[in-house]
Image (spheres, helix red, strand yellow):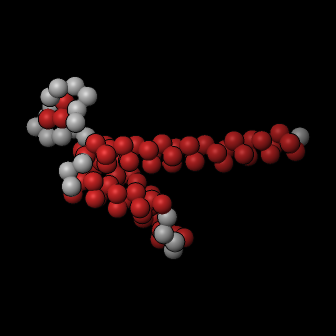
Amino acid sequence: MALLPGQERLLGFDIAILPILGGGAAITYNTLITVLETRRITAGVLVVIALVGSACVGEYLAGAVVALMMLGGQFLESLTPAKTRNAVRELVR
């Protein structure tokens, strides 16, 4: 389902596969590192499974949404420790 007519096959393939490939590579790498370091299954593993599953059944737009949501969440998580450190520094002063 495309937002604009003809958008889904603009380059000869479904362009929603691009965020799956790009985001999926970053998510898979981060998840693999985290799982190997902590030896625990994380939410990233489920996201990787969802991306592979959505690609296998041809639901590229759903996979793209999942990838973008996970990347957005990772970005917000990266901001949290810095804000926490700054808040603690302000309390100590």
At 14% from the left and 40% from the top, the residue drawn is: 13
Image: 69 above or below 31: above
Which of the pair 14/78 is nearer the observer?
14
Which of the pair 40/7 is nearer the observer?
7
Q: Quadrant of the C terminus?
A: top right
Residue 44 pos. (x, y %): 45, 59
Which of the pair 86/4 is nearer the observer?
4
For the question of whether residue 69 can be seen, the reply is yes
For the question of whether residue 22 can be seen, the reply is no
Say left or right for 29 vs 6.
right
At 39% from the left and 52% from the top, the residue drawn is: 26
Classify residue 80 by image quadrant.
Answer: top right
Residue 38 pos. (x, y %): 54, 70
At 25% from the left and 40% from the top, the residue drawn is: 16
Say left or right for 65 vs 59.
right
- The extreme bottom residue here reads 39
- The extreme left residue here reads 12
Say left or right for 16 vs 76.
left
* Count of numbered circles on the image: 0
At 41% from the left and 61% from the top, the residue drawn is: 46
- The extreme front residue here reads 1
Q: Quadrant of the N terminus?
A: top left
Image: 27 above or below 18: below
- The extreme top residue here reads 4
Image: 6 above or below 67: above
Residue 54 pos. (x, y %): 27, 54
